[in-house]
């Protein structure tokens, strides 16, 4: 039992890490990864939503009629997203301003709906929480990696600290939207190379 | 039939539960959010306008209901005498709503200064309304009987070149402030008189 739960948790970290293996949740990874701080904030907000929506969906999995399940999942996910939004507004206001519209947009994040549909609706609550937590942490790390690459190359800083010294000429392209695509593609490529061995 | 009733009941209960949860989170975070908005958006603008006051305008504030809207007025004191108020109005900019903090001297009915609080204007073009002090400085010293419109519209304000829509948005917000101040002046004076006692 404990082993299978650990397995559900682990798979989100590498085997099925959302943006690179499942290739889901790409909108935020392109939009909010201009800095590590934004990326981690977004990742943690998403993690909270995944964990609690998975928990609730799993608890109600035998009650929700299958014909209205998507509507029910959306209600559950939207509720937790709004909770996150209000809490962030109350306690981390500057971060909330930076992430802006992308916090409410977690509602339509494919990972949240995908995990509810593909996993939590068929599994008991504990395994679903482990799945949500694993996916969330995997997602946070992915966002942070892309964020770190883009922030360090595009701005020469990491978490606000200069990393390459004063002579470094920032590669501004990395901070633009096309740079995000290129960066995402490169990380995906490296992950596939490692996975092949 | 049974199934249909079940669908309706499940969705209704779920929505009601979600509504209840959100209402309680909202009530719980409302004051905190108001404080954060004050601290991060309004405070810098108020400090800029009322830079030489002897009190803390954020503490000395009062609210007046204007039609359906509740307006917060921040009072500035010079040598212990409350003679300045600031409040926020809104105009339509190029990229959405634009908030403008307007400071007025209640003895001379002249504008002390204006400052953009929130905006979603194009960086480097419309955002100059906030970043370039020259544009906002034009309002300083104007009395309430002046026409706060761009020169093109028959007023006295030089629009920022390339940012006509933003300039007009700021002017509309300023005109709104003029309108509100003229209409609510007796009420404002009453509140300030109470504060002085």
Image (spheres, coloured by chain):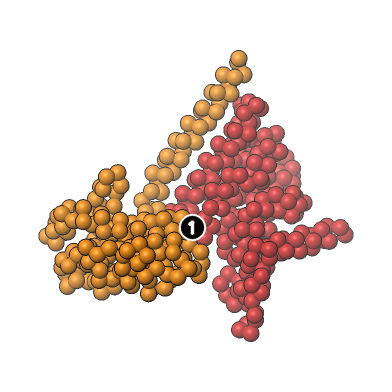
State the hue of chain A. red
Pinpoint residue A165: horizontal percent, then vertical percent.
Answer: 63, 82
Residue at which label 1 appears: B95
Q: Position of residue A179 (x, y in %)?
A: 68, 65
Residue at the location (50% across, 49% down)?
A85
Q: Residues within 10 Å of mark 1 (few under 14, many from 20)?
A: few
Residue A29, relative to residue A5: is it above or below? below
Q: Residue furthest left?
A: B197
Q: Residue A126, image x and y in percent?
A: 65, 40
Whether residue B82 appears in this view of the structure is no
Residue B144 x, y percent position in the rendering: 22, 63
Chain given the colour orange = B
Q: For residue B188, what is the image quadrant?
A: bottom left
Q: Nearer the viewer, residue B29 or B183?
A: B183
* Residue A155 relative to residue B175: left or right: right
Figure check: A7 above or below B178: above
Residue drawn at point x = 36 percent, y = 56 percent: B90
Query: Left of B66 or right of it: where is B94?
Result: right
Residue A65 image-quadrant placement:
top right
Is residue A70 at all visible to an observer of this figure? Answer: yes
- Residue drawn at 86 percent across, 58 percent down: A196
Badge 1 element? loop
The C terminus of chain A - image quarter? bottom right
Left or right: residue B144 versus residue A97 is left
Q: State the image quarter where residue B72 is shown.
A: bottom left
Name the outermost residue toward the top.
Answer: B1
Q: Residue at x 63, y 44 (%)?
A: A112
């Amino acid at each position: 039992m404990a082993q299978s739960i650990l397995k559900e948790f682990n798979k989100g970290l590498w085997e099925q890490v959302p943006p690179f293996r499942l290739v889901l949740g790409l909108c935020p990874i392109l939009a909010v990864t201009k800095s590590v701080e934004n990326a981690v904030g977004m990742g943690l907000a998403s993690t909270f939503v995944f964990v609690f929506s998975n928990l609730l969906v799993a608890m109600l999995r035998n009650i929700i009629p299958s014909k209205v399940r998507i509507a029910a999942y959306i209600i559950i996910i939207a509720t937790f997203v709004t909770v996150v939004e209000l809490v962030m507004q109350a306690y981390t206001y500057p971060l909330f301003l930076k992430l802006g519209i992308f916090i409410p947009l977690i509602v339509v994040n494919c990972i949240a709906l995908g995990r509810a549909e593909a996993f939590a609706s068929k599994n008991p609550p504990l395994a679903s929480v482990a799945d949500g937590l694993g996916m969330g942490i995997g997602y946070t790390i992915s966002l942070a990696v892309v964020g770190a690459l883009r922030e360090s190359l595009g701005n020469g800083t990491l978490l606000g600290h200069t990393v390459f010294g004063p002579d470094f000429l920032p590669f501004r392209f990395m901070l633009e939207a096309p740079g995000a695509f290129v960066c995402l593609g490169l990380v995906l490529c490296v992950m596939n190379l490692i996975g092949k061995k | 039939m049974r199934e249909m009733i079940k669908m309706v009941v499940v969705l209704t209960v779920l929505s009601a539960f979600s509504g209840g949860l959100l209402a309680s989170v909202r009530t719980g975070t409302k004051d905190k959010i108001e404080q954060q908005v004050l601290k991060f958006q309004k405070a810098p603008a108020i400090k800029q306008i009322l830079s030489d006051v002897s009190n803390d305008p954020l503490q000395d504030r009062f609210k007046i209901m204007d039609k359906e809207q509740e307006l917060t007025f921040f009072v500035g004191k010079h040598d212990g005498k409350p003679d300045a108020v600031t409040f926020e109005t809104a105009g339509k900019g190029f990229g959405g709503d634009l908030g403008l903090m307007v400071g007025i001297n209640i003895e001379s009915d002249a504008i002390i200064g204006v400052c953009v609080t929130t905006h979603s204007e194009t960086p480097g073009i419309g955002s100059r309304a906030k970043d370039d002090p020259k544009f906002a400085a034009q309002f300083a010293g104007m009395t309430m009987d002046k026409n706060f419109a761009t020169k093109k519209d028959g007023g006295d304000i030089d629009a920022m070149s390339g940012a006509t829509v933003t300039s007009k948005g700021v002017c509309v917000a300023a005109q709104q402030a003029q309108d509100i101040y003229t209409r609510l002046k007796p009420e404002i004076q009453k509140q300030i008189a109470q504060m002085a006692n």
